[in-house]
Image (tube, helix red, strand yellow):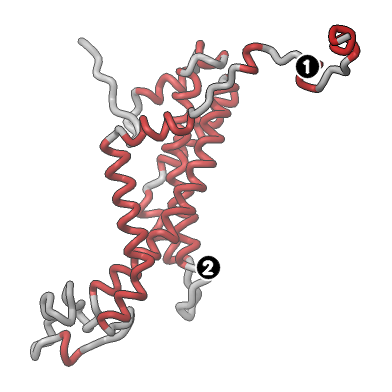
Amino acid sequence: MVGLIEQLRIPTMSNAIAIPSHLAEVPTGRGHELARNALREASVRVGLITVGVVMVAAFAAPLVSLLVGHGVNEQFHSIALNADGVPIGPTAQFWLGADGIGRDILVRSLYGARTSLLVGIPTTTAAMLIGTAVGVAAGFYGGRVDRILSQTTDVVLSFPFIVTALSLVTLNRTATGETIVSPTILVIVVITVFAWTYFARLTQVSSWTSGHTPSSRHPSPSARAGLTSSSPIFCPVSRRR
């Protein structure tokens, strides 16, 4: 009787569908393993500590300002400058001293950390996304796509960063001195335009050296040249004479 019931039992979803062995054996805990391996690197730990300190300083800026009683743009000519108008050094009231017009350097530095995070986080994220997309496309497709994207990257790298940034800042003002675009947005755009190229170069070389794409087995001349170029992301390859 029991055997007959077992034969008449309607198969469930798990019994009716046969899962391939290579799909059933899904590795677990890969994220934790990658995190542990990353934390073994001293550079990763130093970077995390640095970012953590900056974030704590940025969030603590209003609290420190309230504690010392100094605003970010508040000037204290009578107590922060001496008789000759020279800023005083660190004191009990000004822990890091004052600037040339009597403002608290500590408070201004902590509020400056907020600006650094406001610019750094979106800039790095946008540059990484754009550069990764360009590098993967160039390394995966190869051929004409690789040549076009590589030459575009070279053109962007040929522009001097400082000169271009100062020129855009100058052009961002009207005849009356008012800014056309927010300076923060302008800085984010300028840094992103130049920073994505380094992600693209690194991702491009990594894509064809991984051995999973046709272009990785036969890297294009532009990709091979990227390994020995003098761009900041690559170190020159020494050759024996």
Q: Is residue 5 left or right of residue 209?
A: right
Front residue of this view, candidates 106 and 226: 106
Picture residue at 51% right of the left edge, 31% below the top: 135
Picture residue at 33% right of the left edge, 30% below the top: 234
Image coords of residue 69 (percent x, y): 28, 84
Q: Quick check: 94 above or below 123?
A: below
* Element carrying mark 1: helix
Picture residue at 34% right of the left edge, 52% below the top: 51
Circle nearer the viewer, 2 or 1: 1
Q: Amino acid at mark 2?
A: Val
Q: Which residue is mark 2?
A: 181
The quadrant in which residue 66 appears is: bottom left
Q: Which is nearer the N-term, disc 2 or disc 1?
A: 1
Front residue of this view, candidates 15 and 104: 15
Residue furthest out toward the front: 1
Image coords of residue 151 (percent x, y): 50, 32
Picture residue at 55% right of the left edge, 27% below the top: 138
Q: Residues within 10 Å of mark 2 (few under 14, many from 20)?
A: few
Q: Amino acid at mark 1?
A: Asn
Q: Which residue is mark 1?
A: 15
* Element carrying mark 2: loop
Residue furthest out toward the left: 83
Image coords of residue 204 (percent x, y): 48, 27
**In what quadrant of the picture does the C terminus appear?**
top left
